[in-house]
Image (tube, grey):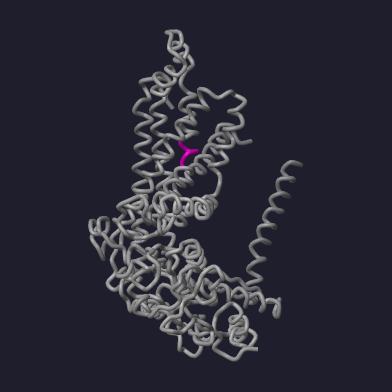
Amino acid sequence: MIPRKYKERAIEGVFLSFASISLVVLLFIMLFLFREGLPIFRVIGPLEFLFGKSWYPTYEPPEFGILPLIMGSLFITVGAIVVAIPLGLASAIYLAEIAHPRIREWVKPAIELLAGVPSVIYGFFGLLVLAPFIQDLFNLPTGLTALTASLLLGIMATPTVISISEDALNSVPGSYREASLALGATRWQTTIRVVVPAALSGISTACILGMARAIEETMAVLMVAGGATLIPTSFLQPVRPLTATIIAEMGEAIHGSPHFHALFAIGVVLFFITLGLNLLADFLTHRFKETGSGTL
Amino acid sequence: MGRNNAWAKAGVTLVAIFVMLLCSPSLGLSKGKSITIRGSTTVLPIAQRLAEKYYQLHPEVGISVSGGGSGVGIKALLDGMVDIASASRPMKDKEWKIAETKGIKPHEQVIAKDGIAVIVHPTNPISELTMAQIKDIYAGRMDNWSQLGGPGRKIVVVSRESASGTYECFHKIVMKKEKITPAAILQAANAGVVNTVAQTEGAIGYIGLGYITGKVKALKVNGVYPTSEVVRKETYPISRPLFMYTRGKPQGVVAVFINFVLSPEGQRIAQKEGFVPIRPVK
């Protein structure tokens, strides 16, 4: 018989290797992304790439300026946050502090379901319902605008904001609420002045992850954002975010051409944006960790 | 002991299943009775119909068709992933060079012709434009239909992603390689262009002839309305050949398939899908 000690160790090893798989995969994705993306800088300088104002990857000579794409992503993401944060936060406060448990039992799965709807379905909804509505409302030549994409992404990011904020609110100890109420504060005052501030780190994390959700969305924005490579000056213009450019052009780019590498380099830019947002979320989570037991 | 026996049995069974799984697809392949086609989204509808019909005639040959784009198809062909690459543009010099370094001599076969139709919203009173006018619109020099004798409505330029075969053809023939305005709306497929134009009163777009539907209005270009007839006679200005590439001269089942594509039956299918046959049709 094999001693129990070794068995334990073997099992531990097996689980460790499974856990490492995702890390290894991440590492390979990074290696691949950088290997395919960095060669573009032999053709064009990094600053010229990031701040160049025109994206004409297949012209002679080609132009690889991604500023219009970055601005497109920025416009859409900012718009999405403006929609998702108030909506998500208010819903989370309602669910955590006000709603009757029986209502919560129904609403929460519904919201989780909303997060599970494939983005192409959102895209169809945006294309067939939202875009014509925006077009009529503002009397625009086309309904495929940054605003349309923002609204749609806002709706898509809301479940993320709700579920993380609600967890944060729920983890605020009951004693905080009891203390506040005992001091004569109303329920509203307790929620706004005590519970929400105590859960602030979790709520900020929720907002940042919602933002990340908006910036990395691809299919829906390809369908509704319009895709013009003009640097946007208003929300009522068609824009082209970074992700949509990759998915639209990767299929026809010649393998190994500067265009191909430029698309991967856009992937590298997106990677750093998401990494930055995740680090920020992580920082905010840990920042307030010690100050109260009520934080996520 | 008995327990060990059970484990051993389970192990043997698993190994047997594994071996069977590994062998079965490779057996199918080793007979060479399958054809894979990948490439242009323009050619995709013809390729699919052709494959269906071919499968009815030769059920022993498995045939799979996928899109992805001309570039994807050609790359897959050069990588040895597919047997036939469909393309809505000829192979580029760079791609020929890659083929050369890999020791492949791609064989080019024109299978049909495609005309690119310029379309507008059905309510647009304009029914004819010249190549120069279309170029001015797409370059952003004209941005209102009133400049062309139409109603005072902003022109919404709809274009394809800058790497599609349809875009490339339009860009070469109409734009003479001039830049398309960055304000143009991007759609990633012919069907997307049709939908956007059908939904947008001021829109103008361009699509493969096979995608014209009642939802949009095709314009006369330089006085010629886009039909199969005029594309074949080459009197319609915006047209192009469609290709199928193989590694070397087609052989075996692939050769049989290519011959089927060029047969009266195959050409009829291409015609039915809205493209223009290059050989007699049954």
**What residue lies at 27% left-to-right and 55% top-to-bottom?**
A50
Tell which of B2 and B82 is nearer to you. B82
Residue visible at 62% across and 78% down in the picture: B50
Considering depth in this image, is B230 or B59 the residue closer to the camera? B230
Residue B200's spot in the image, x, y percent?
Answer: 46, 62
Residue A232 in percent (x, y) is at 31, 54
Quadrant in which residue A242 is drawn:
bottom left
Q: Which residues are magenta?
A: A157-161
Residue B43 is situated, as x and y percent measured from the top left of the image, at 53, 75
Q: Is residue A190 above or below residue A68?
A: above
The quarter of the image holding the C terminus of chain A is: top left
Identify the main secondary structure in magenta. helix
Which residue is outermost to the right? B2
> In the rendered image, is residue B173 in sight?
no
Which corner quadrant of the image does residue B28 belong to?
A: bottom right
Viewer-closest of B209 and B83: B209
Measured as percent of width and height from the top left, residue A108 is found at 57, 33
Q: Is residue A118 left or right of residue B234?
A: right
- Image-based side of B274 in relation to B140, left or right: right
Count all numbered tags in the image, as a single digit. Answer: 0
- A163 to A137, vertically: above or below: above
Residue lying at 55% horizontally and 41% vertically, measured from the top left: A114
- Above or below residue B17? Residue B82 is below
Question: Any magenta on residue B143?
Answer: no
User: Would residue B219 appear left or right of A287 to someone viewing this image?
Assistant: right
